[in-house]
Image: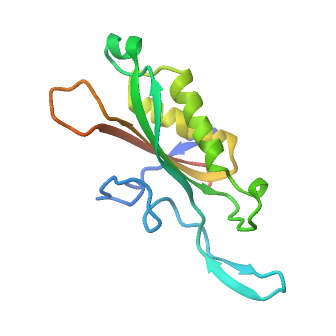
């Protein structure tokens, strides 16, 4: 997808979800995603009940099997990938109505479709494809996706390798 050409998403270069120096531990209430402007919430009787700066919906640790990687064996045999994601809805609706929010199950289904239905050489490309699909399908201003490859075929002893991307709607 072309960035800066009127397409739905663009890469955010703000140093990652928690800013520069983020430890990469996934989404957290205090550091994940952008802050929208503060809105006062009215209670049913018209009184003021709270104030909020943003709403974020996220999931962590979704394990999926896919065929991604540079090596032919990775493409042929496949392996397990772990996806974390967070979105900031355009409208922060706390009405307790499922049809007025972004369902985390629907977000997971998008990740599943991309991981299991397509093939990428790089996990960076996989993360971006998941984020682009979420941004295209849901009324969200920002999407953050992290893809982990727990069993990367490298000679080092590591718990995994990761790529993360944050996309936002143009004008947000």
Q: Which quarter shows the N terminus?
A: top right
> Most extreme residue toward the bottom, as rendered?
47
Q: Quadrant of residue 18?
A: bottom left
Residue 73 in view (yes/no): yes
- Looking at the image, which is closer to me, 27 or 53? 27
Residue 56 sits in quarter: bottom right
Left/right of residue 29 with respect to residue 79 in the rendered view: right
Give the x, y percent position of residue 96.
Answer: 74, 65
| Left or right of residue 23: residue 124 | right
Q: Position of residue 83 (x, y in %)?
A: 46, 40
Q: What residue is drawn where x is 47% and y is 66%?
A: 29
Is residue 76 left or right of 100 when viewed as pictured?
A: left
How far from the left and from the top, in percent, is residue 30? 44, 68
Residue 24 at what x, y percent from top left? 33, 52
Image point (58%, 41%), residue name: 108
Asked whether the viewer can see residue 1, the reply is no
Q: Front-most of 95 and 8?
A: 95
Residue at (38, 14) in percent of width and height: 77
């Amino acid at each position: 997808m072309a960035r800066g050409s009127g397409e739905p998403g663009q890469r955010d270069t703000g140093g990652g979800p928690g800013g520069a120096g983020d430890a990469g531990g996934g989404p957290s209430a205090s550091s994940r995603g952008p802050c929208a402007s503060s809105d006062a919430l009215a209670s049913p009787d018209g009184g003021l009940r709270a104030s909020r700066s943003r709403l974020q919906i996220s999931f962590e640790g979704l394990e999926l099997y896919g065929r991604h990687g540079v090596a032919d064996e990775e493409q042929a045999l496949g392996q397990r990938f772990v996806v974390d994601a967070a979105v900031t809805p355009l409208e922060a609706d706390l009405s307790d109505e499922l049809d007025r929010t972004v369902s985390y199950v629907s977000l997971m289904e998008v990740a599943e479709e991309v991981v299991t239905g397509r093939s990428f050489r790089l996990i960076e490309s996989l993360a971006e494809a998941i984020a682009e699909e979420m941004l295209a399908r849901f009324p969200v201003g920002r999407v953050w996706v992290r893809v982990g490859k727990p069993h990367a075929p490298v000679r080092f002893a590591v718990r995994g390798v990761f790529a993360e991307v944050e996309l936002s709607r143009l004008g947000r």
